[in-house]
Image (cartoon, rainbow, N blue to C red):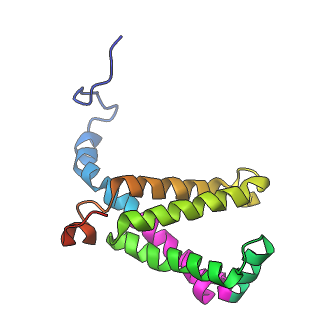
Amino acid sequence: MTSFNATDKTRSIIPALGSVTSALQPLTPVIIRVTTGLLMVPHGAQKLFGAFGGYGLEGTAGWLESIGFAPGFVFALLIGLLEFVGGLMLTVGLLTRPVAAAVLVFMAVAVSTHIPAGYFWNNGGFEMPLMWGLLALTVLIQGGGKFSIDRKIGYEF
């Protein structure tokens, strides 16, 4: 039985992709961080400003109170800011780990509130908050990385 060794070379099924994947591999952490951040921003805009068909602070606050999160306005504001401002911060890699930790906690709560609806997101299930939480966990573990403001200022939080 052979154990896994990171220095072992495996043969690619499509050898021509080897150079492409090798060249792009160092960008993987920034791709995950930037994509996670940018895709969060519109969700925050929905909650804060009613953009993209969202309900704004008032509507979000009412919904949050209806599921037991009171005061709804405070939770709506915090969640909206986390998604909008926090998403921008993740995008540029500023305070990356604290923001990712906050998103992870928020998504853990979101998963727990969506469990009764089952797995699939199109039925209101926990699939999407679970994915967002795992992306936040990945960013939390990796930090801002080479292409981040955290790195530029010399602090990896």
Q: Image check: 128 left or right of 137?
A: right
Q: Image check: 154 left or right of 93?
A: left
Q: Position of residue 126 (x, y in %)?
A: 67, 55
* Magenta region: 34-57
- The residue sitting at 70% across, 81% down in the picture is 71
Image quarter of residue 30: bottom left
Toward the front, the furthest residue is 71
- The residue sitting at 65% across, 62% down in the picture is 110
Q: Position of residue 58 (x, y in %)?
A: 70, 88
Towards the viewer: 123 or 110: 110
- The residue sitting at 34% across, 54% down in the picture is 142
**Is residue 90 positioned above or below 54 on the image?**
above
Q: Image check: 154 left or right of 118?
A: left
Q: Is residue 109 magenta?
A: no
**Is residue 139 positioned above or below 22 on the image?**
below
Image quarter of residue 105: bottom right
Q: Is residue 39 magenta?
A: yes
Toward the top, the furthest residue is 1
